[in-house]
Image (cartoon, rainbow, N blue to C red):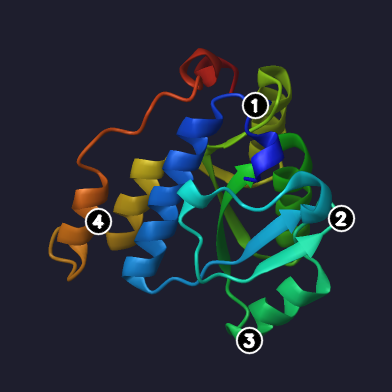
Amino acid sequence: MQEKFRPNIFQFTNIVSNAARVLQAGRILGIPAILTEQYPKGLGPTVPELGAEGLTAHAKTSFTMMIEEVQKELQALGSPKQAILCGIEAHACIACTTYDLLEKGIEVHIVADAVSSRSQTDRLFALSRLKQSGAYLTTTEAVLLQLVQDAKHPNFKEIQKLLSQPSPDTGLLSFFSAL
């Protein structure tokens, strides 16, 4: 979610807003986040409104985020069995990363309202194909609630604050029947 993509990604502001809430929830719950940037020299840095301060941005040119540095970071985290993905573009970086994670036996949850592409057609077909490939499609609110599971969770009130406003519309409703 880099600066140069801002004018071209469908629903960029709302996608970043949703991804920021997922990132905040991860911090509250102690779930580590990994950040990559696609060719930052040409595409610019991660946008500040994502709230990714303090995360090391791994520069890459491949579409998958499963570069050597990320693989080492995953190993250091104990080789997680699940991953939650947010980002752009759905048909490129999200797709390639998902396929690589699935191949490694990692369960992938794609936050559909925190993922987009320049074209709605590419976004739709990417999400459809990723679902067919075994990834789970979810939403910002659903993933946050699934992470806490119960109103008795010690961090539920903090997560609930992130959900005080509904997620902004990111244009997915028109696709629902196709997925």
What amino acid is at disc 1? Pro
Across and down, in percent, residue 164 comes to 20, 41
User: Which mark is on residue 61?
Assistant: 2
CA gap, disc 4 to disc 3? 27 Å
Return the disc, 4 or 3, that comes first in the chain's sequence: 3
Return the disc, 3 or 1, that comes first in the chain's sequence: 1
Task: Tell me if residue 137 comes above or below residue 68 in the rendering.
Answer: above
Query: Which structural element holds mark 1?
Result: loop
Query: Which structural element holds mark 4?
Result: helix
Across and down, in percent, residue 32 comes to 49, 72
Q: Which residue is mark 3?
A: 76
Q: Which residue is mark 4?
A: 159
Across and down, in percent, residue 58 comes to 72, 67
CA gap, disc 3 to disc 2? 23 Å
Q: Residue at x 28, y 33 (%)?
A: 166
Q: Residue at x 63, y 79 (%)?
A: 79
User: Which mark is on residue 7?
Assistant: 1
